[in-house]
Image: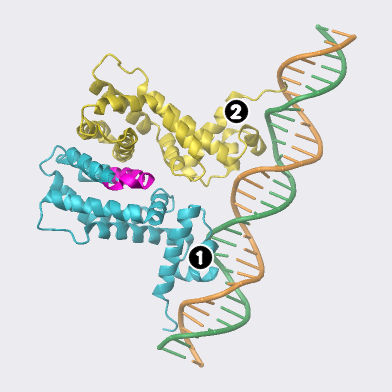
Chain colours: A cyan, B yellow, C orange, D green
DNA sequence: CTTAGTTGTGTGTCTAGTCAGTCTTTAATT
DNA sequence: AATTAAAGACTGACTAGACACACAACTAAG
């Protein structure tokens, strides 16, 4: 061993990438990200082998943070509906209150250099939410559909609701509730 | 007047762009698109001032085609539910049977160089579908929500269902129906 | 004193858009 | 119908700039 890598620097690069990609899109230069993070161009590549590698790790970090936030403090003793509602509102609150993270995540989600493995891993991070969903729909009209299908629909609703909330922040809370009720009608 | 521009060439460029962007993403070089279209590098720029201009026109063309396909042959005498179901199935059928167009459209939809004006124009192309939606929800639980909000949710469901249908073509028809029923429960 | 992180300049590659010269079409004139 | 002139589309080599990543020199940790 010799000089160790610094977690701070890794975080700084990730944080910088979020800001820069949110404002410039995926075409953002690694040099710009490095500068924003306060490290040299070259150092970025000791923490991330390639730009694509950075993108993939960033994608995972954000997805994991999103899922964790949704489930943090979940009232596991309450009814399944209450639990789902809790996760939903925390999920959308995270997304609307971190617009840069959300913007960046949206870009990454459709990027060609996120590998299938990363998409898979991201989906695993959502296991907790999928479990809630499974219990929510178990007696509902979609009980026979593939869970992954129902999860896609839920995810799509969350994305769309978030977009709308960001565009119309004054009524954000209302939109969140309306979308949850819509989801519940759909699955339960 | 002198030598007129050829509609064929414009179409060839648009068609080539669909193919190339579907396979290489938005980073595709204009030279690649021109070659695929069988025109010279330079000619592309007599039909489209800039690459961004090409992207915007392509986006509009695709959105318009999608909306037109959904409403083509609409049984205007039938119940509103039947009409909506008709539009829904045609919409999803177009998207699943033109995977390159769909892939390209998905890329463009989140691209930074689609102008707000283009997004606006694309939304106008959906006026017919929005009208169906308005009538569908007029006595339903979302009657008080902004129509644009409900439209976003519907659009999100359509996108998600399409993705799933492409990944699991054997059960495509089933997924389409399941998603429509989900939509209907949500709004009507 | 060895190992490995750090730096920033360097480099090879790639790309959007340009341009000088050429070719095609249309319209006017004979 | 034949000739001519003007407009402007067509071409592909070219340019100017950007970018991901390599590297040689240097520095800090153990």
Q: Is residue A162 visible?
A: no
Residue holding disc 2: B9
Q: Is residue A112 left or right of residue A130?
A: right
Give neighbour class at mark 1: few <14, some 14-19, many 20+ (Cα, 10 Å).
some
Q: Are marks 1 and 2 on the same chain?
A: no
Label 1, label 2: how many angstroms apart (C-alpha)?
44 Å
Magenta residues?
Answer: A156-173
Kindly identify the residue that appears in the image at 58 percent across and 25 percent down: B8
Q: Residue furthest front?
A: A170
Choose between A88 and D18: the one closer to the eye.
A88
Q: Is residue A164 magenta?
A: yes
In the rendered image, which quarter contains the N terminus of chain A? bottom left
Note whether B153 is above or below A117 in the view shown: above
Which label sits in the foreground, 1 or 2?
A: 1
The answer to which image quadrant residue B44 occupies is: top right
Residue holding disc 1: A36
Report x, y in % for residue B45: 64, 36
């Amino acid at each position: 061993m010799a000089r160790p890598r610094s977690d701070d620097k890794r975080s700084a690069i990730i944080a910088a990438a979020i800001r820069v990609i949110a404002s410039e899109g995926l075409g953002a230069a690694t040099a710009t990200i490095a500068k924003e993070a306060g490290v040299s161009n070259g150092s970025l590549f000791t923490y991330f082998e390639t730009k694509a590698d950075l993108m993939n790790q960033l994608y995972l970090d954000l997805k994991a943070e999103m899922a964790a936030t949704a489930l943090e403090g979940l009232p596991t003793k309450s009814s399944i509906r209450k639990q789902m509602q809790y996760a939903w509102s925390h999920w959308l609150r995270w997304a609307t209150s971190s617009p840069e993270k959300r913007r960046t995540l949206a870009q990454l989600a459709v990027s060609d250099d996120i590998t299938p493995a990363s998409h898979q891993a991201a989906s695993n991070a959502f296991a907790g939410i999928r479990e809630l969903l499974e219990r929510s729909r178990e007696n509902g009209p979609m009980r026979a559909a593939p869970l992954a299908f129902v999860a896609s629909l839920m995810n799509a609703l969350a994305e769309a609701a978030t977009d709308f909330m960001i565009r119309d922040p004054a009524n954000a809370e209302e939109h969140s509730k309306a979308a949850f009720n819509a989801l519940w009608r759909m699955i339960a």
